[in-house]
Amino acid sequence: PNAGDPPRADPLRRSLTRAAGTGIRPSFASSAGREGYMVAHLPTRVAKVADTLALESPHWLRPAVVGALAAPREGRGAAPAGFDAVSLGCGPGFDLPALALVKPLLRLGADGADRTLLGQSGVRVLALDYEARWETEVGAVVAATRSALGLRHSAAFGRCDITLPLAAPANELVE
């Protein structure tokens, strides 16, 4: 539990705490709990992901991120066609604003080439989670990201279950 969590996050926070100790999946039934979780964790989760993606070390990280965000969206193996990134177990989709913040900062490639267009195109994230109720919050994160960082950013929500094998039907969107 975080001391700064708003009271409306309490039902989900309690359920997540119980799940961590018992292995029983938490309940995401409370929309107020999901909204409170977003308010409490959006700034720190986005900052952590953005900071990690912008690191210079290990040496392969920055070129990998730049390459993924600069590559054509169609026909590459790293993400399904049309997406820059896939976020597994993402909950409300915190990776979209993180990538949208980092992308303009990565305009110089590992080879020193200026990739000005990298910062001008939008980010598309496929947000995957086993809990279908996060779909509404992913939409809210998209709206907030567009409002703050531009209309070109987007995300789609899909289902996956990281507790099951990749070949399981629930993970058909994960390749």
Image: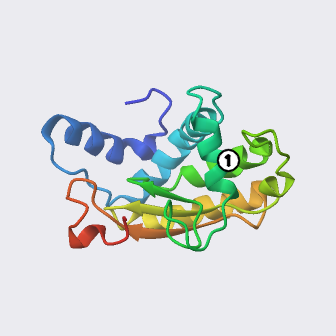
Q: How is the image coloured?
A: rainbow
Looking at the image, the residue that sits furthest to the front is 111
Up/down of 59 relative to 150, above or below: above
Instruction: Name the quadrant containing residue 52.
Output: top right
Q: Residue 154 location in percent, x, y?
A: 64, 66
Q: Residue 72 location in percent, x, y?
A: 67, 67
Q: Residue 167 location in percent, x, y?
A: 22, 66
Instruction: Name the quadrant containing residue 9.
Output: top left
The answer to whether residue 115 is left or right of residue 48 is right
What amino acid type is highlighted by mark number 1?
A: Val
Which residue appears at 41% of the width and 62% of the height?
A: 128
The answer to which of 77 and 43 lies nearer the viewer is 77
Residue 169 in view here: yes
Which residue appears at 33% of the width and 47% of the height?
A: 11
Q: Residue 21 location in percent, x, y?
A: 17, 34
Up/down of 68 relative to 45, above or below: below
The answer to which of 98 and 121 lies nearer the viewer is 121
The secondary structure type at the circle numbered 1 is helix
The answer to whether residue 5 is left or right of residue 65 is left
Q: How many marks?
A: 1
Query: Crowding at label 1, few (<14), some or many (≥20) Cα neighbours within 10 Å?
Result: many
The residue that disc 1 covers is 66
